[in-house]
Amino acid sequence: MDIASAKLIYFSPTRTTRKVVAGIAQGACAHKAEHIDLTPPDTALQALVEVNDDLAIIGAPVYAGRIPAEAASRLRRLRGNGTPAVIVVVYGNRAYEDALLELRDLALEAGFRPVAAGAFIGEHSFSGDATPIAVGRPDGDDLRMAEEFGRAIREKMKEMRALDDIPPLRVPGNFPYKDVAGLTGVTPVSGEGACARCGECASVCPTAAIAVREAAETDANLCIRCCACVKVCTIGARRMEDPRIRQVAEWLSANFRERREPETIL
Ligand SMILES: Cc1cc2nc3c(=O)[nH]c(=O)nc-3n(C[C@H](O)[C@H](O)[C@H](O)COP(=O)(O)O)c2cc1C
């Protein structure tokens, strides 16, 4: 089976997952590659999306060892129609726990056929100057590995004659998946006087939680703490100042310095 057309499907608030998915697609060398970006809030409202391609590369970040609930609900809007799929999670150098298994199961439920899986590393959403965590990742080496993985997938697909040749894909993780104890009422804030009210933060928010009026106001019930708004703010006015998150960031920065490497399953 040749890969003539591919769909790159991802939820990626701070864009590290997107980079990894694009790297894999580069290696898999589809002549026609289209993006289905599930990150903007309007995708949450769209009707079912039919996928009928030679390959889908489906990526999501890891939040507390799981797939973000917001990403899972958007992925449920896809119909895979038997499209072979690469399952990819991107995590912030701590652990991916049950996320890869959960994403594989979501892909199966949506009618895809998982053929390969990968867990890659991205700069942690809570990383900052005082608490660096996996800064700059995926870096050149990670993206070379993503491309290499894409090439290996293309070779494997070439050897297959029919969809039924695809054996069930096993990935690490436990079911039932781990419980997510969500923080409530925690959001980044825009420093009074520092905010230029440019609206960039609102434009990248995947849940439309930010409204910029006299100041940037954030709806704590909608915010998923992805930190896309913090990373996009070029003047540093937008910050995650909640002491609980700062404590987590300090713990991650102190305890997860050792570089983890991407894992692939084919
Ligand atoms: C709420 C939240 C929870 C997270 N939980 C984990 C985790 O359990 N393990 C981990 O290694 N990284 C974790 N991360 C870091 C992200 O997985 C990582 O930064 C990823 O690269 C973000 O992907 P994106 O750039 O596509 O948004 C978490 C990030 C956020 C915002």
Image: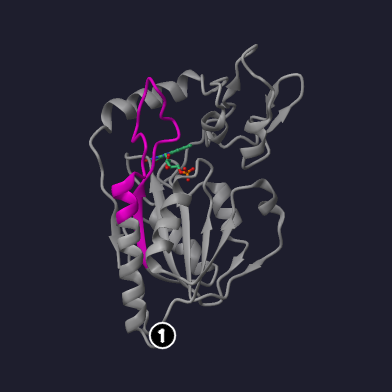
Q: Residue at (43%, 83%) from the top-left corner?
A: 163
Q: Does residue 176 show up? A: no
The amino acid on which the numbered mark 1 sits, given as a three-letter code, is Asp
Above/below status of 101 relative to 63: below
Residue 135 point in image, percent of width and height: 36, 34
Q: Main secondary structure of the magenta part?
A: loop
Query: Would you name the residue on which mark 1 appears?
Result: 164
Q: Residue at (46%, 71%) from the top-left corner?
A: 30
Above/below status of 212 relative to 68: above
Q: Which residue sits furthest right?
A: 213
Residue 151 point in image, percent of width and height: 33, 68
Is residue 118 inside the magenta stretch?
A: yes
33 left or right of 62 in image: right
Q: Residue at (41%, 85%) from the top-left corner?
A: 164
Q: Does residue 81 show up? A: yes
Q: Residue at (42%, 80%) from the top-left corner?
A: 2
Callout 1 environment at 10 Å: few (<14), some (14 to 19), or many (20+)? few
Q: Which residue sits furthest bottom?
A: 161
Residue 224 vs residue 28, the one in the foreground: 28
Above/below status of 251 relative to 4: above
Residue 168 vs residue 207, the one in the foreground: 207
Ligand 1's image quarter is: top left
Residue 229 point in image, percent of width and height: 57, 32
Residue numbers of the magenta segment = 116-144
